Amino acid sequence: MTEELTKKRGVSVPVQIAIWVFLAGLLALVGFGLNHAQNPMAQIGKSVPDFDLEYYPGYEYNGIEKMKLSDLRGKIVVINIWASWCKPCEQEAPDLEQAWQIYKDGGDVVILGVDYVDTPKGAEGYLTKFDITFPNAPDLKSNISSILNRQMGVPETYFIDRTGILRHVKVGPFASVGEIQSIISSME
Amino acid sequence: MFAEFGYGILVVSFIVAFYSLIAAVYGALRKSAAMVESSRRGMFLVFPLLSLSAAALVYLLITNHFEVAFVYEVTSRSMPTYLKVTAWWGGQAGSLLFWAWLLAAFTSAVTLRKWERDIEFLPWVIVVNAVTIIFFLGMVVFYENPFTRFWLVAGNVEPHMFAPLAATLFTPQDGNGLNPLLRHPGMVIHPPMLYLGFVSYVIPYAFAMAALITGRTDDRWIRLTRRWSLWAWLFLSFGLVLGGRWAYDVLGWGGYWGWDPVEIAAFMPWLTGTAFLHSVMIQEKRGLFKHWNMILVILTYALVVFGTFLTRSGVLSSVHAFANSPIGPFFMGYTALTLFVSIALLIWRWPLLHGETEMKSMLSREALFLLNNLLFMSVLIVSFWGVIFPLVSELFTGQKVTVGPPFYERATAPLFAGLMLLMGIAPLSAWGHSTIKTLGRAMWKSALAAAILTVVLFFTYTQNYIALIGFFLIALVLFVTFQEFGRAARARQRAQGENFFTALARLMGRNRRRYGGYIIHISMMLMAIGILGIEIFQKETQGSLAQGEQMELAGYTIEYRELASWPDEGKGVNFTRAVVDVYEDGIYLGELTPRIDYYFDSQQNMTIPGNRSTLKDDLYVLLVDWQPVSSMGATFKVFVNPLVNWLWIGSLLFLAGIIFTAWPDHDPAEEPLRAPQSTNQPSAAD
C-alpha cells in the first residue's frame, strides 16, 4: 500500500543536501555581514585601523576635502572628538586651535576634529564661535568613535604616531596648549 | 562589594546550570531517575540564584554606583528611581542578564509541574532550557559583564571586573543617563514584554525537541505546550503593540511601524508563532501536519535567537541597535548550533511524523488553515529577505542597500489581504470536508452586506480602490464573525431555553479557544481599519509660523500662540513647549502643546507631539524647530492620521481576546484526544 510506504519514508538524500547547503549559505551570508559590522578597535601600542572621513564644508587639509587615516602616515595625528553640546569641549577648543597654529606650517603634525553625535547647525555654530581652522569632520554613524574605542564621553583626544600606532589617549579637556605640546613632543 | 557578590552569584548560577545539563543528559542516557531528579532541582535553583544577582545589579543602579561601567552607561543622578530600576534592561549587559533571569523563571516553573505522565520528556526539556540559559549566562559571565568596574591604571581609565595591579577604583561624578527615548512608560514595559514573548517560546521548543529525541511524536508535546505558546504569543503581541504605541508617541514621525530590521526581527517569530497557533489545531483535531508543526516551532525558536542576535551584534543598522559588541559571533554560532541540531533531529525522526489521515477537500478547514500557514510563511519570507538584503547586496556589490517600507508594504499587502479573506471564510468551513455550496450558503449574507457597505463607502468616503478592497474584507470578516456568534448563541438559546446573552456568555465560556479566536479576529479587523487609515489617508504638512499665524491641513487650522523654554534642574531636562490653538471649520477645539525635551546628561533631544485623538482621526503636531526669542517663530510638522485610533482600540481588544483564550480553566493536557469529526463544527450542521 502506498500509505504504508509513505509512512516509512524519511527525507531523501538530495533534499537533505539541499537543506544543509541552504543553511550553510545563509549562515555564511550572516557571518560575512557580521565580519563587516565588527569594527576593529584601537588599543594603545597597537596600530589604529584605517578609516576615512569627509570634512565639513569649508575645511580641507593640503587642499583635499577628504582624508584617509593611512594617507597621513609619517605625520603625528591628533584626533580630537568633540560635540557642540559638550561644555568641557568649549574649554579646550581655543587651546586646540592655538596648537594648530603652532604646528600647521611645519606639516609634521595634523590636528583633526571629529564631531560626535551632533546637528550640522550646532556644529557650524561651534566651529564659527571658536574660529576653528584645523580640519573637522562629522563622525557619521559614530563610526570613528567606535573604531577608536571611545571609553567615556566627549571630549577625548587620540594621539597617533608617525607609524600609525596609538600612543596616548586623553580623556577630558586639555588644561592648556602646553599640555598638548608636551604630549606631542614626547612622541617625537 | 555588591558588584563582586552579583558577579559571584552569576558564576555560581552558570555552574549550577551546567551541572543540571550534564546530570540531565547522564540521567536520560543511563535511565537514572535520581540523576534526572537532581538536574531538575539544580534547574529549579537557577532562578532564585539569578534573582540574587539581579537584585545586586538593581541595588547598584538605584544607589548611583557609577564606578560600575553598566550603571555609568545607563543611569544618572537626575533619574527617578523607577527609571533606574528599568535601566536594568536599557543596555546590552543588563538586558542579557534580564533575558537569562526571565528564562530561568520560566524554566523553574516548568520543573515544578507534575511530570508523572511525561517523565521521559523531563531530562530533555531540562537540557534545552539549560543550554539556552548557559549560553546567555556565558555571554554575561565572560563577555558582557554588567558588574565590570572602572579602574584607574597608570592614568588611564579601564573597565575590569577585578582590580588590575596597582589600580585604584575610579568613580565618575555622574552617569551618562538612560537614553531619553527609552524613558517613556511604554518603553518601560515594551522590552520586558518582548523578552517574555521570546523567552516563553523556548518552552514549546524544548518540549518539541524532547518529543523528537524520545521518539514520542504523538501530539502530547503540543497539548502540554499549548498554553505556553498562547502566553508566549500574548507577550510577543503585547510587546509589538507597545513598541508601536511608543514609536507613535515618542519618535515623532507620525507613524507606529517603520519596518525597521529590529521590528521585523520581533515580527518574524510572531508570524511563525501565529501560524503555529493555527496549525497545532489541525494536528490536535485531525492528526495532520506533524512535520509542519515541528518545523514551525523550530523556526520560531531559531527566529527568536536570530532576532536577539540581529539586535545585539551590530550586523544591521537600526534605531534599536545596541553598541558594537563582541558577542555577535557567539550569537551566530549559537543560532547555527540550534538550527543544526534541530534540523538533524527532525530529519532523523521524519518517518515517525507522518499524518494519520489525508487531506480530502480543498475547502475543508484544515486546507484553509494550510493556506493561512502558507500566507504567513510568505510574509515571513518577504520580511526575512528584506532584513538580509543589505547583506546580500553588500556581498555582491560592496554597497549596503537597505530596502525601505515601500518594499514591505507592496509585497505584504496582498498577502495580508489573503489572510483577511481566509479569516472570513475559514470559520465557516468544516473539519474534513466543505464544498463551495456549503460555504456559499453560510456566507452569502455577510458578503452581500459587506459589498453594500463598500458601495456606500465608495460614494461617501473614498474612491481609493485599495482602501475599498480593504474595507470590504474588514466588513466581511466582521459580519461573518458576528454572524457566527449570533447563530451559535441562538442555537443554544433554543436548545437550553436561556436568554440570548446568557447563551452567548455560556457558549463563549465553554469554548474559549474558538470564541477567543473570533474576538482576536475582530480585533485584528479593528486594527486593520486603523492601519488602512494611516497608511492610505495620512496627510502631512510642515511650515514655519510667526506668532498668531495659521496653517491648514485637512479641514484643521492650527494657530501658533506662544512658546516657552525652561530648564528643570531636578529632572535634568530643558523643556521647550509651544502652544497652538486648533480649529476645525472655524470652530475652536482646544490647544495642543508639542514639546522638545532636551536631556542634559545624555545630551539628546526628544520630540513629544501634541496629539488630538478622536475615533475619526488624530491631529498630530510636532515642534520641529524654533527661532531665538526676538522673532518667536517656530516650525511645525502636522499630520492628520485618519482612523488611527482604531489601531489602539483593536490592540486592547486583541489583548483581551488572548487573555480570554489563554485564561486557565482546565488543563488542555487532560482533554480527550482527537475530537470526533463532525460534532465539533456546528456551522457544517447548520
Image (spheres, coloured by chain):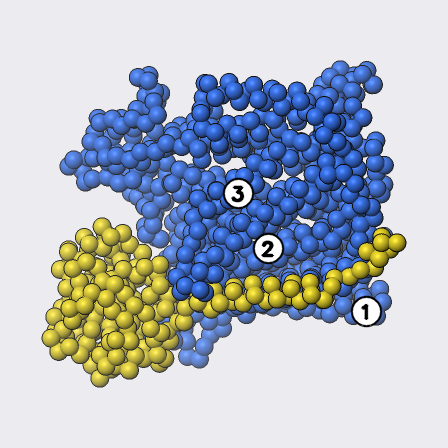
Chain colours: A yellow, B blue
Chain of the residue under the numbered disc 3 shown in the image: B
Q: Amino acid at mark 1?
A: Leu
Q: Amino acid at mark 3?
A: Thr
Q: Secondary structure at mark 3?
A: helix
Query: Which residue is identified by label 1?
Result: B29
Of residue B168 and residue B53, the one placed in the foreground of this image is B53
Query: Which residue is identified by label 3?
Result: B412
Q: CA distance from mark 2 to mark 3?
A: 19 Å
Above or below, comparing residue B58 to residue B463 in the picture: below
Looking at the image, residue B399 sits to the left or right of residue B652; the answer is: left
Image point (80%, 50%), residue name:
B355
Q: Give coordinates of residue B255: x percent, y percent.
A: 43, 39
Q: Secondary structure at mark 1?
A: helix
> Which numbered disc, 2 or 3, marks the residue closer to the eye?
3
Query: In which quarter of the view is residue B390 placed?
Result: bottom left
Of residue B585 and residue A125, the one placed in the foreground of this image is B585
Image point (48%, 56%), residue name:
B389
Q: Give coordinates of residue B423: x percent, y percent.
A: 64, 33
Say if mark 3 contacts mark 1, CB within 8 Å: no
Query: In which quarter of the view is residue B153 placed?
Result: bottom left
The answer to whether marks 3 and 1 sit on the same chain is yes
Q: CA distance from mark 2 to mark 1?
A: 30 Å
Neighbor class of circle 3 (other Cα within 10 Å; few <14, some 14-19, many 20+) is: many
Q: How many marks?
A: 3
Neighbor class of circle 2 (other Cα within 10 Å; few <14, some 14-19, many 20+) is: many
> Which numbered disc, 2 or 1, marks the residue closer to the eye?
2
Looking at the image, residue B326 sits to the left or right of residue B206; the answer is: left
Image point (49%, 70%), residue name:
B161
Q: Give coordinates of residue B175: x percent, y percent.
A: 39, 57
The answer to whether residue B582 is visible is: no
Query: Which residue is identified by label 2?
Result: B303
